[in-house]
Image (tube, rainbow, N blue to C red):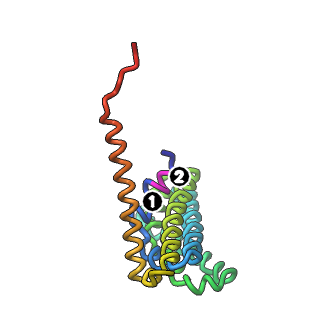
């Protein structure tokens, strides 16, 4: 499994690691809101990870976390200002959750675990994979909630977000368990030696 697929699927920040759930649940009431937050998170994660990777050897060990938070806060502010200037209607709906991207543990975790230790190439692939995984999770949740709102109005409200997310996560776990079982059964099957 390559680094991008591992970051997006095997280590999916929302579905597997359960990181960044606060904005995921709060903003995913529509696909448009979910897409806005996904793009904002992607820009912040990718920009922060690349900058930290580029200057990682200059950051003193004692102050690395404050430095990481400062870099993430800088990119969050830039995204916040850009959205306010160019997508004001969307910004009004999700502004609070764009502003708190700086505290998103998914971003800080990837900066700490990968960007502070790896070169630019690996960091970029990991950041894009993590962003793609988060975007997929938030967009699927947003689409499910928006579709369910038609017959199940609770889906648009905060309790509905928990219910829909719980059902989707349960589905992901069931599919994952079935795959693991099928792999286990395949490896337990008797092997026929084809050599003569």
Determine which of the numbered discs, if any, sits on residue 117 in the image. none
**Dominant secondary structure, magenta:** helix
Q: Residues within 10 Å of mark 1 (few under 14, many from 20)?
A: many
Image position of 85 with respect to 189: above or below? below
Task: Answer with mark 2 or mark 1, whichever residue precedes in sequence.
Answer: 2
- For disc 2, the neighbor class at 10 Å (few under 14, some 14 to 19, many from 20) is many
Residue at 45 percent across and 66 percent down: it is 106
Q: Is residue 113 left or right of residue 46?
A: left
Asked if residue 70 shows in the view, the reply is: no
* In front of the other: 186 or 150: 150
* Picture residue at 47% right of the left edge, 81% below the top: 151
Q: Is residue 159 visible?
A: yes
| Coordinates of residue 69 in the picture (x, y in percent) | 48, 71
Q: Is residue 116 above or below residue 32?
A: above
* Element assignment for label 1: loop
Residue at the (64%, 85%) spot, across then down:
89
Magenta extent: 4-9
Q: CA distance from mark 2 to mark 1?
A: 11 Å
- Return the residue at label 1: 12
Q: Which residue is mark 2?
A: 4
Towards the viewer: 188 or 46:
188
The secondary element bearing badge 2 is classed as helix
Q: Quadrant of residue 183?
A: top left
Q: Nearer the viewer, residue 87 or 52?
A: 87
Tell me what residue is drawn at x 56 percent, y 78 percent. 33
Q: Position of residue 88 (x, y in %)?
A: 65, 85
Magenta stretch: residue 85 in it? no
Q: Please state, as top left, top right, bottom left or bottom right, where the C terminus lies in the image.
A: top left
Q: Position of residue 23 (x, y in %)?
A: 47, 76
Q: Position of residue 186 (x, y in %)?
A: 35, 38
Residues tagged 2 and 1 counted as in contact (Cβ below 8 A)? no
């Amino acid at each position: 499994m390559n680094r991008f697929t591992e970051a997006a699927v095997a280590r999916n920040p929302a579905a597997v690691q359960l990181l960044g759930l606060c904005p995921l649940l709060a903003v995913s009431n529509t696909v448009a809101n979910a897409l806005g937050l996904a793009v904002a998170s992607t820009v912040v994660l990718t920009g922060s990870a690349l900058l930290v990777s580029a200057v990682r050897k200059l950051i003193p060990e004692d102050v690395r976390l404050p430095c990481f938070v400062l870099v993430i806060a800088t990119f969050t502010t830039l995204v916040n200002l850009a959205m306010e200037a160019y997508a004001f209607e969307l910004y009004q709906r999700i502004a609070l959750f764009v502003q708190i991207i700086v505290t998103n543990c998914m971003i800080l975790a990837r900066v700490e675990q990968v960007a502070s230790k790896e070169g630019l190439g690996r960091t970029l692939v990991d950041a894009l994979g993590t962003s793609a995984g988060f975007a997929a999770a938030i967009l699927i949740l947003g689409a499910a909630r928006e579709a369910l709102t038609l017959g199940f109005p609770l889906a648009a409200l905060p309790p509905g977000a928990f219910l829909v997310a719980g059902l989707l996560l349960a589905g992901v776990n069931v599919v994952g368990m079935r795959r693991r079982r099928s792999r286990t059964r395949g490896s337990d099957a008797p092997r026929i030696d084809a050599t003569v």
